[in-house]
Amino acid sequence: MLEIRDLDLYYGAAQALRKVSLSARTGEITCILGRNGVGKTSLLRAIDGRQRAAGGSIVFDGKDVMGLKTPDRVRRGFASVPQGREIFPLLTVRENLETGFAPLPPGKRSIPTTVFELFPVLESMLDRRGGDLSGGQQQQLAIGRALVTRPRLLMLDEPTEGIQPSVIKDIGRAIAYLRDQGDMVILLVEQYLDFANELADAIHVMDRGEVVLAGPAKELDPDAIRKHLTV
């Protein structure tokens, strides 16, 4: 459903992505692993259009989206959960979730029950300000906001960063549940191999802006992966 071929991306004279190619299928979790600064976030930004790629192609559901701006990609089902969460701290939980209504037609502007089934704490805190939530609760809110848009492509950028272990387990269960529904492509950017191994169907390892190792998660050598994750 998602096909990326020979993607190049620059920040000024610095090249962040070098001929990156990957495929991700509906009903699977495709994990992108790598150390800090190897291009993982840049890849997600290129996919959703926040950063313009210099070359290559991004095909989603059989259609090239390289020429589309971010709002148009969102209307086609792209949703991102950014690193650092980026919720609105002065808005309530309800209002944060409702920002996901923007790309939806009026008849679909409601919060799916799935959001509260996956993250019950959000329903109990609908009138609390986002900035008053813990880091783990804010991460759940960021994922919930993305789910409000009814995504067909869900991209999560290091959702375990700075989160307590109990919430990490909740987030892992939620991601696995979404995969098992079989109706979306899930891209998961991570640094932690153990979390990735629990969830990933396929793994792509990045180093210096390139994909250096890729394949089904069960077939890749963990030691070969770790070699690219250690400093």
Image (tube, grey):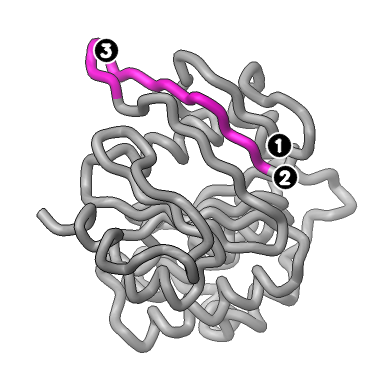
Nearest to the observer: residue 110 or residue 44: 44
**Left or right: where does residue 154 sit relative to residue 89?**
right
* Lower sequence index among marks 2 and 3: 2
**Region of the chain picked out in magenta, as a range:** 2-15
Q: Is 35 placed above or below 216 here?
A: above
* Residue 50 location (% of width, % of height): 48, 29
- Residue type pointed to by label 2: Met
The reply to whether discs 1 and 3 touch (Cβ–Cβ < 8 Å) is no
Q: Residue 14: which quarter of the image? A: top left
In the image, 35: left or right of 139?
left
As shown in the figure, which amino acid type bears the numbered disc 1? Phe
Q: Residue tagged by mark 1? A: 60
Q: What residue lies at 77% left-to-right and 61% top-to-bottom?
A: 183
- Separation of marks 1 and 2 at Cα, in angstroms: 6 Å
Query: Marks 2 and 1: in contact by CB < 8 Å?
Result: yes
Specify the label residue 134 is tagged with. none
Answer with the quarter of the image where residue 119 lies: bottom right
Q: Which quadrant does the C terminus fall into?
A: bottom left
